[in-house]
Image (cartoon, rainbow, N blue to C red):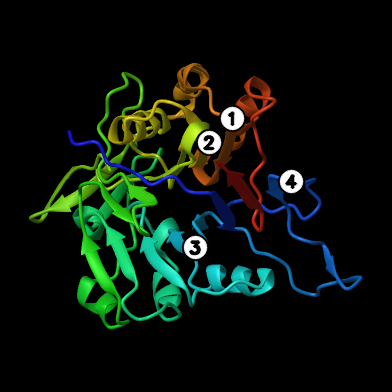
Amino acid sequence: MEIQNLQVVDSVEIVILVDNYVDVLLAGSEQVQRPLLAKDGVISTETLIAEHGLALLITVHVGGEEHSILLDTGYNRDTVRHNMRILGLKLDTLDAVVLSHGHMDHTGGLDSVLDNVPAHTKVIVHPIAFSQRHFTLPTGGKVKFPPMPEVEHLKQFGVDMVKSAGPLKLANDTVLVTGQIPRVTSFETGLPGAFMEVEGELVTDSVEDDQSLVINLGEKGLVVISGCAHSGIVNSVLYAQELTGISRVNSVIGGFHLTGAAMAPLIEPTIQEMKKLAPELIVPMHCTGLEAAQRFAQEFPDSFVRSSVGTRIVLSK
């Protein structure tokens, strides 16, 4: 495999636009900035919205330039735009939208987002993200996922669709999209009960379209940002190291998908492997689940950050 030469950035800012949790009273720090409760001494009549979804606005700064990428678009149509308005943010300088995978809690706001991005904004997506998917409930019944919008529909927004299963670089080689992530750990076995339609038949869905973003902070190491980590969050970080040839990990941010009874046995082995990777910052989000997030807080007291909608994470080289 060819090493992806990833340009070192001066800094990166990650704004949590959509996540499952919001708390306007959380304490912040220089590195983790929480949204203001009040402006000009007055508390707003509107608030940030949390939902079962994820969207992150990622802005890299290098050599006086900045590039912004949106990872995922949340679940409901207008949550991203609502929260951006509350935070005073816009999409008019966006370089690309990257979809971590084709599930509705990451793609539901796509139309609303694409209606507000510059012409020829790139939309990065794995080819199988458009597949019709199904899920087996614990009770035994199957439910159908809302499908991704069709490619031709998305092209109507004037964006440039990029369907890719392999790694690719964006924003002047400052952000790496991993593409499909190899499954190498023994315990990260994917999403139980997932199926997809292939030529009219239901087959097991290993969520091969799962992909993450990687940013290089130089001597401080890699920032790895996942959507749901259906490939496994450890697999995601290991692949980032393999792709870049960089072993040091600065931050691991995003959904770890450790929620629910079926995923509970993965919590402890994930924590033990994460200790070997030794990131300086861990921000579990979205599908990580309360139990797993609490265990990360206990085991990584100096690295753990509680995710909340509106939070701005600032990392510098």
Question: As shown in the figure, which amino acid type bears the numbered disc 1?
Answer: Glu
> Residue at left 56%, top 68%?
79
- Label 2 to label 3: alpha-carbon separation: 20 Å
Question: As shown in the figure, which amino acid type bears the numbered disc 4?
Answer: Glu
Q: Is residue 5 left or right of residue 221?
A: left
Residues 197 and 312: in front is 312
Q: Is residue 294 left or right of residue 201?
A: right
- Label 2 to label 1: alpha-carbon separation: 6 Å
Q: Earlier in the sequence, mark 3 or mark 4?
A: 4
User: Element type at marker 1?
Assistant: loop
Q: Earlier in the sequence, mark 3 or mark 1?
A: 3
Q: Which residue is mark 2?
A: 251
User: Element type at marker 2?
Assistant: strand
Q: Earlier in the sequence, mark 2 or mark 3?
A: 3
Above or below for 244 versus 127? above
What is the x, y in percent for residue 8? 44, 44
How crowded is the residue under tag 3: few (<14 C-alpha within 10 Å), some, or many (20+)? some
What is the x, y in percent for residue 59? 51, 58
| Tag 2 and tag 3, C-beta contact below 8 Å | no
Q: Which residue is mark 4?
A: 30
User: Element type at marker 3?
Assistant: strand
Badge number at residue 66: 3
